[in-house]
Amino acid sequence: MDYIEYIQQLFNEHEDKENAFHMEKYMRNKFPFLGIKTPLRRKLMQQFLKESGIRKEKFQRTFVRSLWNLKEREYQYAALDYIGVSLEKLDKSDISLMEELITSKSWWDTVDMLAQKAVGKISRSFPGVIEENIEFWNDSDHLWLQRSAILFQLKYKEQTNEDLLYRYIITHSQSKEFFIQKAIGWALREYSKTNPDSVRQFMEKHPLSKLSVREGSKYI
């Protein structure tokens, strides 16, 4: 079975130009869309996953890259759907694929899932990638790699490396980039559910943007 051809056929049958217009507008016309809304796309992907049997195979990197290279945004979402059900199959070497995806066709709608789910899972299972890869992301000039470094521990809760989180935040605390300020606030807000006193003390000691403080303070 040609997996890409199968998904294209499924998706093309449900193309909706009116939906596509509004979806493209919402995403600032950065990407073309077929007009398949999320609930329907997920239903179609469930059909694909069931009928193709791809979940019984090892993680298909070529499949992910092929979806990512297709024009319409729904295909990148399909790749994310597949990655999302394949997290347990990811190994250390897949961090390079995640970097490739984060830095290609980049926007919050793909980057945030990759950071907190795929990168989060790989880093939890193979902590060596933090020093080998994510440290580089944090120090890079790439907006979306920076954001990913800040967010990859988002769901770690008690397993959060607090020193690492705070160091990454301090590195970018004076950034003027909206998506970095927002990521800092989001990371602090999420960690405050686990350790509110620590987050409160951190925000009192370190100058942060108003946006980061507002977002980070929501639960404390």
Image (cartoon, rainbow, N blue to C red):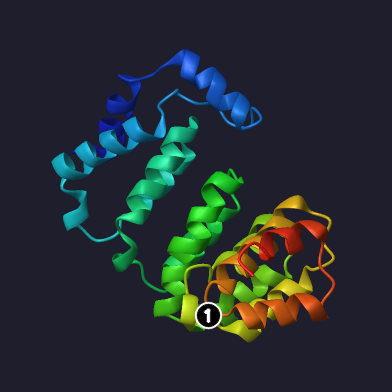
State whether residue 24 is above or below residue 219: above
Q: Nearer the viewer, residue 196 or 44?
A: 196
Based on the displayed image, in which of its 4 quarters is residue 45 positioned?
top left
Q: Residue at x 84, y 56 (%)?
A: 176
SS for callout 1: loop
From the viewer's perspective, tell me whether residue 131 is left or right of residue 142: left
In percent of width and height, residue 128 lies at 50, 83
Q: Amino acid at mark 1?
A: Thr
Q: Residue at x 67, y 77 (%)?
A: 199
- Name the residue beneath numbered marker 1: 160
Q: Quadrant of the N terminus?
A: top left
Q: Nearer the viewer, residue 57 or 13?
A: 13
Q: Nearer the viewer, residue 151 or 8?
A: 151
In percent of width and height, residue 118 lies at 44, 62
Is residue 144 visible in the rendered image? The answer is yes
From the viewer's perspective, tell me whether residue 59 is left or right of residue 92: left
In percent of width and height, residue 126 lies at 43, 80
Based on the displayed image, in which of its 4 quarters is residue 132 positioned?
bottom right
Based on the displayed image, in which of its 4 quarters is residue 74 positioned?
top left
Q: Residues within 10 Å of mark 1 (few under 14, many from 20)?
A: some
Residue furthest out toward the front: 220
Q: Residue at x 36, y 54 (%)?
A: 83
State whether residue 143 is above or below residue 157: above
In percent of width and height, residue 18 lies at 49, 13
